[in-house]
Amino acid sequence: MIEFKNISKSYRKGTKAVDDLSFTVNDGEIFGFLGPNGAGKSTTIRMLTGILGIDEGQILLDGHDISKDPLNAKKTFGYVADDPDQFLTLKGIEYLNFMADIYDVKDRKEKIETLTKRFEIFDALNSRIESYSHGMRQKIIICGCLMHEPKNWILDEPMTGLDPKSSFDLKTRMREHADAGNCVFFSTHVLDVAEKICDRVGIINKGKLLFVGSLDEMKETFKEDATLEQLFLEITGNAA
Amino acid sequence: MLHNVFHLTKVFLLTAFRRSEGRRPWLKFLYAFLFLYLAFIAGFISYGLIDTLIPLHQEEAFTGIVLMLVISFTLFTTIISCINVFYFSKDNLFILPLPLKGKEVLSAKLNVLLVYSYTEILFFGLIPLLVYGVMCEKGLMFFLMVIPVLLLLPVIPLVLVSFFVMSVMALTGGIRNKALVQGLSMTFGILFSLAISLVSSSISTNEEVMQLLVKVNGLSELYQKTFFTMPLAMTALNKGNLLSLLGLAAVSALAYALLVLYGEKAYYRGMIGSLYSSEGVSSKKLDGESAFSSRGLAYSYVMKELKTYIRRPTFFVQLVLPGLILPAFMILVFYVSLRSEAGMIKDILRQFFADRGNDGYVLGALVFLHMFCSLYSYISVVAISKDGHDACAMKYLPIPFYRQLIYKMIPDFLSCLIGSVISTVLLVILIGLPLRFVVMALPICLSYFALHGFLILLDAARPKLNWSRELEVCKNNLLMLGSIVFGLLGMALVALCVFVLHMNAILQTVCLTLLYLLLTAAGYFFIKKEDIRLAAHIQ
């Protein structure tokens, strides 16, 4: 479970990138975090993962405060950053072994084989990540993140660059993971994906949380027969 | 076409030099000082050589030597920039899809390379010739000719280098082996500079200077036969011959045009490939069970760090290689410069080791040398910045930040240690340094190298993560001065122990080792205590 309690963050005095954000991502659900460019999504995710400090408020991951108990909080999640150009000088297998060492994964051979075969990058494991295509880099980062079977998945734009099969696989795994009582928190610009797989969504704009709830609740509140795209545009004030 | 070439050249140059924008005034002052210093050195050496040639009435040979140097340096030093500008420049990705003619892009890139070579020619071409003009009281025509000659002379060598590079890249598909090509070219560049230093260090007497000048003059004559633009440039300079200058301009323009025509095919054949995945995904199978083996977190983390330094040619050449080979190289240079008296010096040193070994001078000198060697170890001052955006992983991985800092210090320690071991072995072989001094220096050096790793705190305080070129972080980075200042402080402390406190060898070993161990322990407790505050700088 991920709990955001009155989170605020300012980069410059007087301008809040994230302003008093409060919501909970429950176990057993896929939560989509939506918002236009510059809305504060990345800042929120960076605070959630401990990359950015929090000015005000508290973020709890399975009860562990990311600011006060960072190590235990970090052990509860797997994070896929929006930029897959990471650890480029390492070979795929070296990266996965490195992640397995960090998270002390016991049956690493089996997990590496299962994950990489599922994402169809097993044959490329002996090559450096810098030689991978954008999609392959995204896949190897996802494999590294999922290998230790974290309870909470935090995925920043995870579908970007993935081919249809891998995208489908990842969505299936997200569903399976949530159905097993775990929590999936992901940001996306692809509203179709959010509409199809999210149990609940949060919409943020200009640092403020505008809506949290299921698609049905959103329709009840705004328009009965609108799509998520139409609702999103209306909520964020971008409707024509 | 000229319009496009002009604008492209401008864009390429602005991109290359944009880092200089927004620099602080004191930095500009530092660069101005460096410029004046180099200009002074160039002028001073030129003065010495011309002064040697004037009594022999051979001063005109100096112009030949300078022009030969201009050609040689353009030939050898542009190989690296040529490969980078033509093939590994990031702007290729943006330029290729634009509706520009091949010859326009190629001409603009050639212009950029010419501008690069002009910045070098300023020091070993323009300044020496100006000094020559003043010392030999040359007329106005000489000074008027200097600029156009120096602008035109590098064209032919640059065309030759470009032709060579384009042909090799087109035939071998070198773009697919970026790391190998860059690594080889940079190592070649370093070896070339080291070879020049080694040759120059072997000259100490006037006779040796004269012998070298005769050799160089002979080489210059050979160049005149090979590079037919050189006699034209010499005639234009020495005799003020306008026709020769026009001839030089015509030949250079023709060569430039021919290269552009040739390059239209060869350049694009070498460049177009998979620019994103230039290395190509290997189909090599994993090595059975061992591919999945674990040797622990610390080993895994340190290996990740070492692989980053070794597999990125720029990091390897700029951060690892200097620490490994420069100390040994300096010892060799010193030895070569004294080779004629080597036997005598060895005898004197042997006697000195026996008589004064215990009073601390020999140990002090040895420790001093190792600290001097560590000046060239820049790994810890860029250990975080070199990761760029990857450094954010330090924040979300569930490992305490201070432990990650320690893992990042280990390559620095190893670099200092290996450089030191190589130097020690050379000293034992070349001057017969007794092993007891090595043993006494060992604890001091080990504790000092451990402390040296804490220079990572400079990087942790102000990490430079938003870089687009590796050189921005491992060359154009003022934090690297931190290693030099730290080394100088260490050397001053050794000098204090030896010359002011008159410590004997054993006392030095005990005091310095204890001091560095205490400081290392203090550093450890500091990073452990300030773990979260230090990590806050990485975002």
Image (spheres, rainbow, N blue to C red):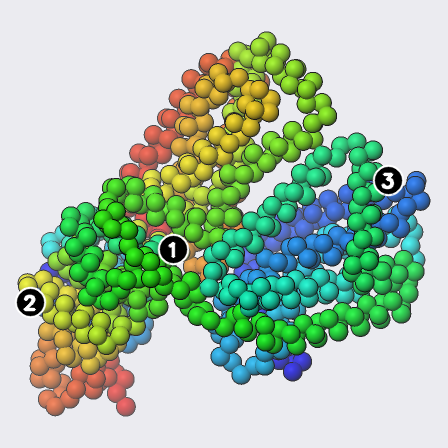
Labels 2, 3: one chain? no
Label 1 sits on a secondary structure element that is: loop
Q: Which residue is mark 2?
A: A179
- Mark 2 and mark 3 in contact? Answer it, CB < 8 Å: no
Q: Which residue is mark 1?
A: A89
Going by the image, does B340 lie left or right of A62? Answer: right
Q: Residue at x 10, y 76 (%)?
A: A214
Between marks 1 and 2, how big is the CA–CA gap?
Answer: 36 Å
Task: Say which chain tag 1 marks.
Answer: A
| Numbered disc 3: secondary structure | helix
Residue type of the residue flagged with mark 3: Thr
Q: Tag on residue A134?
A: none
Amino acid type, label 2: Asp
Residue A55 rendering spot, x and y as whole percentages: 26, 57
Give residue A90's position: percent from left, percent from top.
35, 54
Which quadrant holds the N terminus of chain B? bottom right
- Sequence-wise, the earlier of marks 1 and 2 is 1
User: Is residue B366 toward the left or the right of residue A178 in the image?
Assistant: right
> Which kind of residue does numbered mark 1 sit on?
Thr
- Tell me the quadrant of the picture where the C terminus of chain B can be found: bottom left
How far is the residue under mark 2 from the one under mark 3?
A: 88 Å
Q: Picture coordinates of residue B444 (x, y %)?
A: 44, 24
Q: In the rendered view, would you say B164 is above or below B253?
A: above
